[in-house]
Amino acid sequence: MTADAPPVPRRTAAPGQGPVVCAVSAGGAIGAVARHGAGLLWPTAPGHFPWTTLLINALGCALIGVLLVSIAERPTAHRLTRPFLGTGVLGGFTTFSTYAVETQQLFDTGRVATGVAYAAGTLLAALAAVWAAAALTRRLLTGRRG
């Protein structure tokens, strides 16, 4: 006879995390639909520079800069604001996986210089966007108080 194996504990989210998971999921769905819609409105023709993805990522990063500074300056923001808008909506809207695939496609089709420009340009645009938007938001919020 074999002995019964000890019960395996179920892994669940930490207590109270259900609303956060739901907020991230709902926001992510909204962001992904918005990103898809932008791709339908401004499609990138095969073999052309993927401007739409670059602009989506730069815009999303700028909005992340605005959001995070706004939340940091408003300690009374609802606890689900950042998970819903930041991780969810803006995380679903920005698309660095598509950016990686498009970069690889440019390399695979022999457009190495364009691939390098796209890879570097997207990173620089995203970093510049989040920095500039955060700085401007901080300045605007500070100006209102003074």
Image (spheres, rainbow, N blue to C red):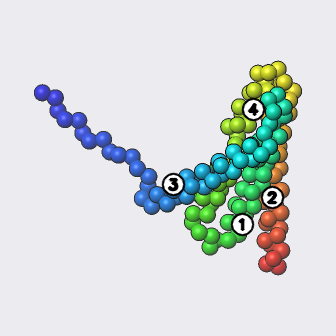
State the image coordinates of residue 31 (x, y, percent, origin top left): 66, 51
Q: Which mark is residue 133?
A: 2
Under mark 1, the amino acid is Ser
Under mark 4, the amino acid is Glu
Q: Residue at x 12, y 27 (%)?
A: 1
Where disc 3 sits, the SS reads helix
Q: Residue furthest front?
A: 41
Q: In the rendered view, does 132 fall on the left or right side of 18? A: right
The residue that mark 1 highlights is: 70
Q: Residue at x 42, y 59 (%)?
A: 15
Q: Residue furthest left?
A: 1
58 vs 45, nearest the viewer: 45
Few, some or many residues within 10 Å of mark 4 (<14, 14–19, 20+):
many
Q: Relative to 44, is 71 above or below?
A: below
Please tell me which of labels 2 and 1 falls first in the chain: 1
The residue that mark 4 highlights is: 102
Q: Relative to 71, is 126 above or below?
A: above
Contact between marks 3 and 1 (CB within 8 A): the answer is no
Q: CA distance from mark 2 to mark 3?
A: 27 Å
Q: Quadrant of the C terminus?
A: bottom right
Where disc 2 sits, the SS reads helix
Q: Nearer the viewer, mark 1 or mark 4?
A: 4
Contact between marks 1 and 4 (CB within 8 A): the answer is no
30 vs 125, nearest the viewer: 30
Under mark 3, the amino acid is Val
Q: Relative to 1, is 44 above or below?
A: below
The residue that mark 3 highlights is: 21
Contact between marks 2 and 4 (CB within 8 A): the answer is no
Please tell me which of labels 2 and 4 falls first in the chain: 4
Under mark 2, the amino acid is Ala
